[in-house]
Each structure stands twice: as C-alpha cells, then as structure tokens.
Amino acid sequence: QVQVVESGGGLVQAGGSLRLSCSVSGPIFRINVAGWYRQAPGKQRELVASITNSGRTNYADFVSGRFTISRHATIGGENTVFLQMNSLESEDTAVYFCNVESFQNSYWGQGTQVTVSS
C-alpha cells in the first residue's frame, strides 16, 4: 500500500521559513508528478508547486519566487518531496497536502498545518 506522509508544518512568524517534507513509501513504480497543494479555511484546495520525474517545476503565481520544490529518490525506491518556503506571509496559512501521481493512480497525504502569524 502506498503511503504519503507530510511533515514540517508549524507556527512561524511572518517573514520566516519552513521546510515541508513528503515521504512516499510502498509499491509505486514511478512517480510521474509530485505536487504540493494547500487549502485555507473556506477556500478550495489549490496547487502550490509541482515537479515532474524529469525535474521540471511549476509554481503558482502567488509563490513569487519564495518557495522551492525538490525531490530526492534513493536506489531503494524511497522518495521524498520537499517544499522550502521562505518569506512566509499570513496569507500562506493553510493545510499543505502532498500529492504524487503514477501512471494509474494519484495518492494524497493527510496534510500538515502551516500557520503564519503577522
């Protein structure tokens, strides 16, 4: 069974930084696309950033160069997707979710809360 587990969220002051991690384990042959999404209270879930198997990245306009997505894969098949977030703003407060897509399936984690105090 494929498991997606996020970590690294927390409370940070505006202007601060956080690094989110997404650990992917289980029988997944290849991750084609991995992405970070977020959902603030009363709002729809939205894409923050994504990275393809070839390393191509895509960012939402609101990121404005503040976030960086990356991924690391081991020979043993373990995958980790990171989201480095700098210059955080109160508007970045949300639950952040990791999503990974293989050829046939899409997997979501449970999310990690990020709260930015102004």
Image (cartoon, rainbow, N blue to C red):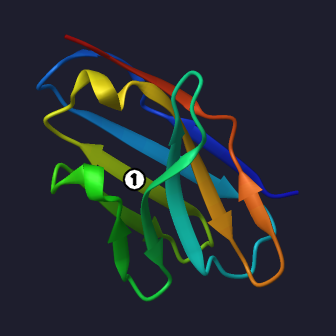
Left or right: 5, with 84 as reference point: right
User: Which residue corresponds to the image point at 62% horizontal and 57% vertical from the top-left?
Assistant: 99
> In what element is the residue under mark 1?
strand
The quadrant of the picture occupied by the C terminus is top left
The quadrant of the picture occupied by the N terminus is bottom right
Left or right: 70, with 23 as reference point: left
Rendered position, 44 above or below 58: above
Picture quadrant of residue 24: bottom right
User: Which residue corresponds to the image point at 50% horizontal and 83% vertical from the top-left?
Assistant: 53
Find the residue positioned furthest to the bottom: 54
Give 100 or 3, whichever is nearer the viewer: 100
Q: Residues within 10 Å of mark 1 (few under 14, many from 20)?
A: many
**Looking at the picture, how far across and down is residue 8, in whole percent?**
42, 31
Give 102 or 1, whichever is nearer the viewer: 102
Rendered position, 95 above or below 19: above
**Looking at the picture, how far across and down is residue 18, in whole percent?**
28, 33
User: Which residue corresponds to the image point at 39% horizontal and 53% vertical from the top-left?
Assistant: 82
Picture quadrant of residue 28: bottom right
Left or right: 35, with 90 as reference point: right
Circle 1: residue type: Phe
Q: Which residue is mark 1?
A: 82
User: Which residue corresponds to the image point at 17% horizontal and 54% vertical from the top-left?
Assistant: 64
